[in-house]
Image (spheres, grey):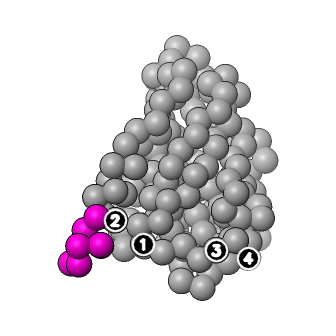
Amino acid sequence: MSPLKSLLAATAVFIALPAFADGIEINDAYARVSTAMSKSGAAFMVIANSSGADDRLVSVASDVADRVELHTHKAGADGVMQMVEVPEGFAVPAGGQHVLQRGGDHVMFMGLHRSLAQGDVVTVTLTFENAGDVVLDIPVDLTRAEAPMQMMHGGHGNMPAPSN
């Protein structure tokens, strides 16, 4: 591995440290695109709520794309999996967590303003009903394989499906 790639990898690990706000903790965040020239991408993470009150991720924003939305995968009438926006957001129960993962709930970037490469960083603002805004620097990880534990411990409503 070249010194530059080593530095980028070390920086990505440092940047991927948890983010906190009023009982909300964001862990294991990463972003990816399907190809280097793709105009869309996605971000995944674990949202934990250590507060005594339920909360809800209601919106997401970033200057990396024309549109940034909360999405999930659902089976269409023909049985084919489709990505759909979730305008009501994602519930994060008190003392619980909600997992944004490949094949399930996720942050969707549409109309990327630039290509995303391994080691790049995407700044995202997550807005919660109670906790407010959480600003997060998310490393781009194009090599990461979906972990088996993500399939077993997905957030409410997540279902296994082909990777993004």
Q: Is residue 93 shown in magenta?
A: no
Q: Give the Cα distance between marks 2 and 4.
A: 43 Å
Q: Residues within 10 Å of mark 1 (few under 14, many from 20)?
A: some
Magenta residues (range): 1-7
Residue at 68 percent across and 71 percent down: it is 112
Residues at marks 2 and 1 touching, judged by CB atoms closer than 8 Å: yes
The answer to which of marks 4 and 3 sits earlier in the sequence is: 4
Q: How many marks?
A: 4
Residue 100 can be seen, yes or no: yes
**Residue linked to disc 2:** 8
Q: Who is closer to the viewer here, 114 or 30?
A: 114
**Residue linked to disc 1:** 118
Q: Is residue 97 above or below residue 105?
A: above
**Residue linked to disc 4:** 78
Q: Residues within 10 Å of mark 2 (few under 14, many from 20)?
A: some
Q: x%, y% of residue 14?
A: 33, 49
- Mark nearer the viewer, 2 or 1: 2
Residues at marks 4 and 3 touching, judged by CB atoms closer than 8 Å: no
Residue at 59 percent across and 35 percent down: it is 134
Q: Give the Cα distance between marks 4 and 3.
A: 34 Å
- Mark nearer the viewer, 4 or 3: 3
Answer left or right for 15 relative to 44. left
Quarter of the image that includes the C terminus: bottom right
Q: Is residue 61 above or below residue 19?
A: below
**Residue linked to disc 3:** 114
Q: Residues within 10 Å of mark 3 (few under 14, many from 20)?
A: few
The answer to which of marks 2 and 4 sits earlier in the sequence is: 2
Q: Amino acid at mark 4?
A: Asp
Q: x%, y% of residue 104?
A: 56, 58
- Mark nearer the viewer, 2 or 4: 2
Q: Who is closer to the viewer here, 42 or 139?
A: 139
